[in-house]
Amino acid sequence: MAERNEKFNKNRGEKREDNTPHRLIAINRVTKVVKGGRRMRFTALVVVGDEKGSVGIGTGKAAEVPEAIKKAVEAAKRDVKPVAVVGTTIPHRAEGVYGRGRVLLMPAEEGTGVIAGGPVRAVLEMAGIKDIRTKSIGTTTPINCVRATINGLRQLRTAEEIMEVRNIGKADDEKIVL
């Protein structure tokens, strides 16, 4: 019986060329009032990441949910950028802002886990960050929280990157102030 199910389900649905890990954060039904009534469409918010320090977000809109998700994944793949990760956490404290939403990102010791809510957690897990504390302030709209998180992650710099920008040689005993 299992062989039969595998045989029939093998070619079902879309073929995915690459298995890029992605996570669906939100689906919204939006309407447009036209002469003949209301036109329903769907928007999807997706985060894509390799869980090794790269993450991107995308939105898609279509008449059907699967098509909206597909468009969002494609947009997110085009948006993937690297994030500074030191071990399992972030190198320093950062604050991301988007609209009225603010997300504070604070490094945490190994073993702490991801202390974040909803959309912020999805972004951090897809980026491959294992130990972090966060605080969402202001609006809790998923798109604003996600974009604020991405803005905060893109502010992060490792000590080596900062030393390179400041033209400082490799310092063994010196403490770098971030």
Image (cartoon, rainbow, N blue to C red):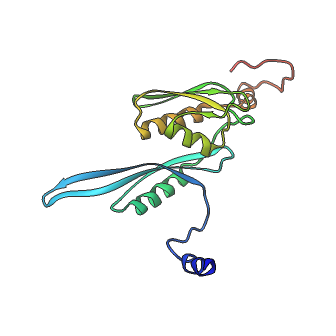
Q: Position of residue 78 (x, y in %)?
A: 54, 53
Residue at the farthest left position: 35
The residue sitting at the right extreme is: 172
Quadrant location of the N terminus? bottom right
Which quarter of the picture shows residue 111? Answer: top right
Name the spot of residue 130 as percent of width and height, x first.
67, 38
Residue 34: quadrant of the picture: bottom left
User: Residue placed at 55% from the left, 71% from the top?
Assistant: 15
* Up/down of 24 relative to 171, above or below: below
Q: Answer left or right for 69 relative to 170.
A: left
Direction from residue 40 to residue 18 in the image, left or right: right
Count of marks placed on residues = 0
What residue sits 60% from the left and 55% below the top?
A: 21
- Above-or-below relation of 133 to 29: above
- Choose top left, top right, bottom left or bottom right for residue 113: top right
In the rendered structure, the answer to whether residue 40 lies left or right of residue 17 reads left
Residue drawn at (55%, 80%) of the image: 8
Quarter of the image with the C terminus in it: top right
Q: Position of residue 95 (x, y in %)?
A: 54, 26
* On screen, residue 44 above or below 89: below
Residue at 23 percent of width and 53 percent of height = 32
Q: Nearer the viewer, residue 131 or 61?
A: 131
